[in-house]
Each structure stands twice: as structure tokens, then as C-alpha cells.
Image (cartoon, helix red, strand yellow):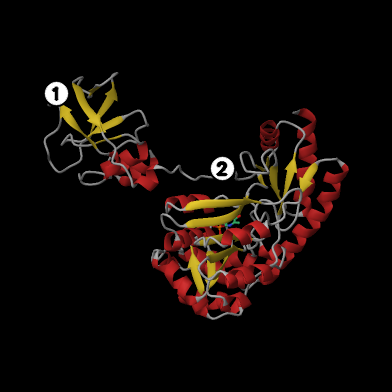
């Protein structure tokens, strides 16, 4: 409703069961928001994937005036529709197909709704917020800058300086996810292979599927979830296009020796080795900056986790200028928003904020782990600000009970090797005390 009044066309938002026929009777649309937007525009055939073609029996429409005067139709049963004058309409619906690769995909989504105000231990975000310098900088942003496309050069320079590399090595993206997407767009292709150890971060596989790549997975080693070095080294012999390494790995926390990664990249020049270092601040393991002498090695970082800017979306790819430039070829010219750029300068000016958060997480982890052990709960914790926990109770009931008590955790249902566990992000000491108290309460009742 709010949208319709803001658009100023005196329209209403229709629900999904409504259908809309245009004066020219060429198009009918179903989804509420889309319908509203279509009506808001001078009449043009709307987005093609919603297009409807067919014949009508009635002439109950409105003359073509150029003005939008939609006729609302309601479903009347099999094969027919009636407009508001009661005339029946008959037509066939054909939805324009996307590319065959896209038709084979499913939407990749994460359970992000309704999390505000709860203790968020489900996405490994910073749980205490960004530096006060960031808050001040975003608040101080001149309204004039809201209306301008952002500038990126100085931020690239600033970030490169923080890493001790040259600016040409740095690319800015809409979160590390934006960089991951660009990697696959630029280097993935039908018939090429993505190699990765599993379980790992869930976005690599859909990006590979979007490009029609073959995915070759090698399981992490049990019982300790060690990286399957030998199997990966062997699989590299068949020259995969991409090797994704998450270090430390999400969700197992597995730490990888940077020297081994560098050696693998050096020995396999035809494979782009991408090291996702989103949680590097918690381990200090990195292939930077020396790795930048290795042209097929790319590092991904982000301000989402430790710096507490997940909502602003700012990620970095750091590698040889030739690789970074190719990623930029498949990235929009203003994909990173101006608030993120402003916030990033302030976050980089306050490394102490990240340091103290990392320390706090370490202390919270040291507080929690002995309690899990004493309770006899199976758990696994290595690098990163998260751990895996195998509850004795029914997983879904426990997760739901925790949510009712204000605590969010992430079930690993369906993930190889960790199915049946929950991933719990580690926040501050006070937060982990609260988590443990609520966990015990829930475990006692479900
Ligand atoms: C390993 C890993 N890579 C990338 C991302 C995405 O990060 P960003 O928020 O920077 O897009 C996440 C987020 O959970 C992650 O865990």
C-alpha cells in the first residue's frame, strides 16, 4: 500500500492470486510488487518473463489512451478468467524461459528474515557492531553524496596500504560474495571444473552451476575435519580451472598452512587458486602479501565479519593486477555503495576495534569450550569465530526453542559430514554466557 501511494498512481498492490490484464490485453502479471511497478509505468510490455499472450472474448477493456488503466481479473476456475464486469477471458500463459543454465538453478537464499533484536549466532557476523568511528562517519556523510555515484580509487589505495601491497592488486566488490560471483563469471565456463573440499561455504557451488561448471568435491578428513591435502593435490593433476580454499574453513574451522597453498598454486599455474580469508583475523593464517608474487593466487577478504559491516557489503579481492582487472570486467561500475566506501575508511582507521573484538571472541571461546566438554556434548572448534555442536535432542526442535528464547544458531542440515550439527557463532563473553544458559534451558525441555 505504501508503495502504491508513493508511486502516486492511485494503484493498489495485488496479492499473488490476482491477475492483471492491461488495456491492450497483451500482458497479465501475477506477483504483487511487480504488478504495482508495471502499473506505475506508462504502458509498455513488462518484463518478458511475466508475459501472457492470448485471446479474449470480452471487450470490457478500456480504450488505449496511453494511460494505465488496468483491469483486475479474478480466477474463475479451470481455463478461464472473469474481469470485473463478469466477462470471461481465456488465454494461455507462457513464461519466457531464462538460459538453460539458469532454468536448472534454484534460488540461493539464506534464512535472513526476522533476526533483528535477537542474539545472532547464525551468520558469524560481528555481534557487537562496528567501530564508533564508522557510525560517526556514516552519520556525517553529506546528503550531497547520497546522490552521487561513489569514488573507489582512494579506498583501493587505502586498503592496499593497510595490506602493504600496490593499489593495482586490490579490487572492491559488493561483499566477498560479489567477488566470488565475479571469479566464477570471469573464470568459470561450461566444461571447466571447480575443485573444493566439502563441507565449505555454500555460495561457491551455485556460482559454479551458473557457469555450467563441473564441481569436484573432496571430503574433509574425519574425525578432526583436516584438509584433504593428498586428495586435493591429486585432483589438481587434472587441471581444474578453479580451486576454492576457505581458510579457516566455514563451517569446520579447519586451518590451512599458507605455505602449502602457495606451493600448490606455484605447481599448478593453470588453476586459479582462490583463498577465501573471511575469518583470517581469528587465525592470522594468510597467503598475503608474499602470495601476490604468484599470479594464479587470489585472496578474498571482507569487512562483514570482524569489522561489523555486513549490512553495508564491502569485500575485497587481492591478487595479481591481471586477475583483479578481469574480475572488474564482470563487475558493474558502481556495485559498491557510497555508505560502504565511507564506512570502510573509518573501519580501516580503527584496527584496534577489530583487534579487541578478536580478543573478546577468543576469551568467549575459552569460556565456552570447557563447558561443552564438561556437559559431554560433541563439538568441534578450530579457526574462526564459530563452532559446531551436535545436540543430543532433535535438531529442529532445539533450534526452534532457542529462537523462541531469542538465540539464533544455524543448523547444518544436509551438509556433508556435519549434518545433524548446529553452527554457533562465537560472540562476546556475555553473549556466550547467555547462549549457554539458554541452550541448557532448551535442551532440558525439547
Ligand atoms: C567463507 C565466507 N566467504 C564469504 C562470505 C560472504 O561474505 P560477505 O558478507 O563479505 O559477502 C561468507 C559469509 O558468511 C563466508 O562465511
Figure check: 31 above or below 211: above
The quarter of the displayed image where residue 406 is located:
top right
Q: Is residue 97 left or right of residue 313?
A: left
Q: Is residue 217 left or right of residue 88?
A: right
- Give the alpha-carbon distance from disc 1 to disc 2, as whole Å: 45 Å
Q: Nearer the viewer, residue 422 or 158?
A: 422
Q: What residue is shown at x 68% (from left), y 43% (from top)? A: 418
Indicate the position of residue 272 as horizontal and vertical percent values. 52, 66
- Whether label 1 touches label 2, CB < 8 Å: no
* First of labels 1, 2 by sequence position: 1
Instruction: Report the residue marked by disc 2.
Output: 111
| SS for dot 1 | loop
- Please state, as top left, top right, bottom left or bottom right, where the N terminus lies in the image: top left
The quarter of the displayed image where residue 333 is located:
bottom left
The quarter of the displayed image where residue 189 is located:
bottom left
Indicate the position of residue 401 as horizontal and vertical percent values. 70, 33
Instruction: Report the residue marked by disc 1.
Output: 57
Amino acid at each position: 500500500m505504501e508503495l502504491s501511494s508513493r508511486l502516486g498512481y492511485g494503484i493498489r498492490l495485488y496479492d499473488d492470486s490476482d491477475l492483471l490484464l492491461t488495456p491492450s490485453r497483451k500482458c497479465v502479471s501475477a506477483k504483487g510488487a511487480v504488478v504495482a511497478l508495471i502499473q506505475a509505468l506508462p504502458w509498455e510490455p513488462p518484463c518478458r518473463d511475466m508475459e501472457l499472450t492470448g485471446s479474449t472474448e470480452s471487450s470490457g477493456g478500456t480504450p488505449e489512451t496511453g494511460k494505465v488503466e488496468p483491469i483486475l481479473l479474478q480466477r474463475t476456475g479451470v481455463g478461464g478468467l472473469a474481469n470485473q464486469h463478469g466477462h470471461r477471458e481465456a488465454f494461455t500463459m507462457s513464461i519466457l524461459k531464462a538460459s538453460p543454465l539458469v532454468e536448472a538453478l534454484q534460488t540461493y537464499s539464506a534464512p535472513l528474515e526476522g533476526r533483528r533484536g535477537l542474539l545472532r549466532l547464525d551468520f558469524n557476523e560481528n555481534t557487537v557492531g562496528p567501530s564508533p568511528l564508522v557510525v560517526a562517519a556514516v552519520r556525517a556523510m553529506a546528503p550531497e553524496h547520497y546522490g552521487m555515484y561513489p569514488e573507489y580509487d582512494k579506498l583501493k589505495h587505502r586498503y592496499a596500504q593497510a595490506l602493504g601491497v600496490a593499489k593495482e592488486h586490490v579490487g572492491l566488490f559488493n561483499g566477498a560474495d560479489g567477488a566470488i560471483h565475479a571469479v566464477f563469471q570471469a573464470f568459470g565456463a561450461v566444461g571447466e571444473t571447480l575443485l573444493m573440499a566439502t563441507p565449505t561455504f555454500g555460495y561457491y557451488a551455485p556460482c559454479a552451476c551458473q557457469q555450467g561448471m563441473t564441481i569436484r568435491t573432496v571430503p574433509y578428513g574425519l574425525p578432526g575435519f583436516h584438509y584433504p591435502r593428498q586428495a586435493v593435490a591429486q585432483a589438481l593433476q587434472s587441471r581444474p580451472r578453479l580451486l576454492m580454499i576457505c581458510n579457516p574453513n566455514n563451517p569446520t574451522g579447519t586451518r590451512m598452512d599458507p605455505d602449502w597453498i602457495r606451493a600448490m598454486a606455484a605447481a599448478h599455474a593453470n588453476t586459479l587458486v582462490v583463498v577465501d580469508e573471511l575469518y583470517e583475523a581469528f587465525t592470522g593464517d594468510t597467503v598475503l602479501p608474499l602470495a601476490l608474487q604468484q599470479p594464479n593466487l587470489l585472496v578474498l577478504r571482507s569487512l562483514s565479519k570482524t569489522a561489523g559491516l555486513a549490512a553495508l557489503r564491502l569485500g575485497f579481492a587481492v591478487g595479481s593486477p591481471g586477475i583483479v582487472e578481469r574480475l572488474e570486467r564482470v563487475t558493474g561500475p558502481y556495485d559498491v555503495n557510497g555508505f560502504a566506501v565511507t564506512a570502510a575508511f573509518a573501519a580501516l582507521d580503527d584496527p584496534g576495534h577489530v583487534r579487541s573484538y578478536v580478543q573478546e571472541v577468543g576469551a568467549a571461546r575459552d569460556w565456552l569450550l570447557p563447558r561443552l566438554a564438561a556437559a559431554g556434548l560433541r563439538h568441534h572448534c578450530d579457526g574462526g569465530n564459530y563452532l559446531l555442536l551436535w545436540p543430543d535432542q532433535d535438531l529442529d526442535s532445539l533450534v526452534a526453542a532457542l529462537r523462541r528464547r531469542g538465540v539464533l544458531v544455524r543448523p547444518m542440515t544436509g551438509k556433508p559430514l556435519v549434518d545433524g550439527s548446529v553452527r554457533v557463532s562465537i560472540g562476546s563473553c556475555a553473549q556466550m554466557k547467555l547462549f549457554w544458559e539458554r541452550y541448557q534451558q532448551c535442551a532440558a525441555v525439547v
